[in-house]
Amino acid sequence: MKSRLLSIVSVSLLGLALGSARSVAAGTYIAYISDSTSSSVIYWLAKDMGIYKKHGLDLEMIFINGSVRGIQSMIAGDLGYSGAVGTAVINAKLAGADVAIIQSQMNTLPYFIIGNPNIKSPEQLKGRSAAVHIPGTSADFALRLALAKVGVAYKDIKAVTVGGAPARLAAAMTGQMDFTVLTEGEKIQAEKAGLKTIIDMAKLKVPFQFNCGVTTRKRIRENPDEVRRVVLAMIESVHFYKTHKEESIKVMQKYTRGLGRDILDGAYAANAELLVDDGYPTLEGLKQTLEIQALTEPRAAKAKVEDFVELRFVDEMRKSGFVEKLR
């Protein structure tokens, strides 16, 4: 299916893969930005369980590795919607992109620093090699924040960009890199392979805009009804996940290429605890991210949280009692 065939690694490759997307089917694509067990399951369910169609949506789902690339493709007009994380949305908006978060799936950092068992303490990460994601992703932000919490400067590690969670996990498991940053499902795999958890970011409950749905404000102005239906579909997909474990795990297994049941059970439980029922973004998390970015980016100091979100659809959903009706 298209969601598995169109694995796109750059905006230019997206253009090649989709051809004249703007003239043929502009806006019919929605991108998920990770094949990790924690990042995209809501998109997978919305597509495979017919939830998009239930809400009158004809969306083709594709995979683009990383929210930075997803947003770039959306700005270029090749996508109608993309998954993302708050840092990528902030960076895009500060650079002049007319984008907005329309709903949220997770509002905290569900990450772990995992590494070689001979690393006895977080302080010993200094000087070690790390498999990292591209700047602006949640994995990148989580690693930087975790290092800051233990007093290790990012410049004092040997960071090597390898990409998404499966690639980072493989780099650590094969010993190519000393440590990396992963979410629950990959953490379980890493520990089974003999690696150890060095820092548990999930325990810190840091407010952070993790998984969220993004579109352009132009699209919001021109087709608000479609945007509204996308928001409702994503929220219903969260409800489906929490109330249909076996079906959800089956879909997770499909998109993660057959991970073991024990790994998927652990990932399912972690996701069920963190997924946001009403789709409301974390304004506190966005504010804290802005404050951190303002230390090196003057434009962030002048920005307001409201610049990065469009809350009308989740507000309408709350008033309508949509979530309560799903129960």
Image (cartoon, grey):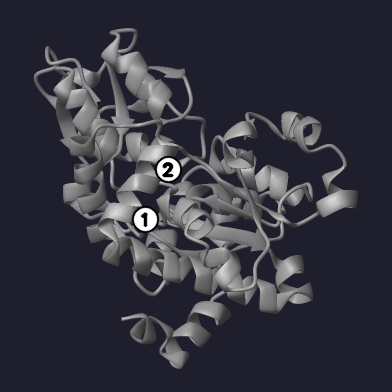
N-term-proximal mark, 2 vs 1: 2
Residue 57 placement (x, y as % from top left): 65, 67
Instruction: Give the position of the N terminus as an image quadrant.
Output: top right
Q: Residue at x 26, y 27 (%)?
A: 152
* Residue matched to label 2: 138
Residue 215 placement (x, y as % from top left): 65, 61
Label 1 SS: loop
Q: Is residue 131 left or right of residue 148?
A: right
The residues tagged by marks 2 and 1 sit, at their Cα atoms, a distance apart of: 9 Å
* Residue matched to label 1: 208
Residue 305 visible (yes or no):
no
Label 2 SS: helix
Q: Nearer the viewer, residue 233 or 198?
A: 233
Q: Nearer the viewer, residue 141 or 273?
A: 273
Disc 2 residue type? Ser
Does the CB distance between marks 2 and 1 fall below 8 Å?
A: yes
Location of residue 40 with respect to 115 vertically, above or below:
below
Residue 267 visible (yes or no):
yes
As drawn, which residue projects farthest toward the right? 23
Q: Is residue 54 left or right of residue 245?
A: right
Residue 249 placement (x, y as % from top left): 31, 48
Instruction: Give the position of the C terminus as an image quadrant.
Output: bottom left
Number of the label disc, if any, that sits on residue 98 = none
Location of residue 309 with respect to 301 vertically, above or below:
below
Q: Nearer the viewer, residue 283 or 321?
A: 321
Where, by quadrant of the figure, is residue 191 drawn?
A: top left
Disc 1 residue type? Phe
**Badge 2 density bin: few <14, some 14–19, many ≥20, Cα 10 Å:** many
**Badge 1 density bin: few <14, some 14–19, many ≥20, Cα 10 Å:** many
Q: How many marks?
A: 2
Q: Residue at x 39, y 75 (%)?
A: 278
